[in-house]
Amino acid sequence: MSKTQSAKTKLQTFRDRVKAAAPGYSGFAEAVKIGDEELNRLYSFDEALIRYVDKIDAALDKLDESVSSNEGLDDAIGSLDQLTLEANDAFSLREDVLTNINKSLTA
């Protein structure tokens, strides 16, 4: 169970962060005008986050298969743990982009 706890915690953190993220850009864009380059960067991050959701689904399917067959369980857990770490890092980078855009526009 301790092997799965790390992956579970990271997965829950990623889920909570995505769920709590403000939807869309219209409110922010209306108050402060941002350029096409900044908006494209945000869209790229969001697209990457969607791909992580698909990858996490696949990793969870692999974990399920490993539990059922009792083979490759450590590798499946390790892969899920690493993937959830990467997904959280990507979300942090997105937050940094938003923070830097806000700082540059209010300076």
Image (tube, rainbow, N blue to C red):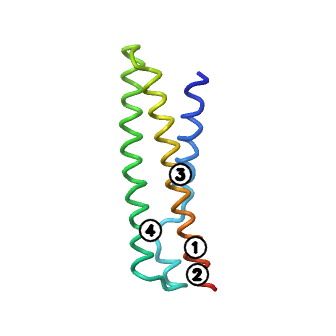
Give the Cα distance between marks 3 and 1.
16 Å
* Element type where label 2 sits in the image: helix
Give the Cα distance between marks 2 and 1.
6 Å
Q: Residues within 10 Å of mark 3 (few under 14, many from 20)?
A: few
Q: Which residue is mark 4?
A: 42
Measured as percent of width and height from the top left, residue 99 is found at: 59, 70
Give the Cα distance between marks 2 and 3.
22 Å
Is 7 or 57 nearer to us in this picture? 7
Q: Residue at x 53, y 60 (%)?
A: 93
Q: Residues within 10 Å of mark 4 (few under 14, many from 20)?
A: some
Which numbered disc, 4 or 2, marks the residue closer to the eye?
A: 2
Amino acid marked by disc 3: Asp
N-terminal label among 4 and 3: 4
Q: Residue at x 50, y 84 (%)?
A: 30
Amino acid marked by disc 1: Asn
Instruction: Tell whether label 4 touches label 1 (CB within 8 Å).
Output: no
Is 30 or 50 nearer to us in this picture? 50
Q: Which residue is mark 2?
A: 104
Q: Residue at x 39, y 80 (%)?
A: 36
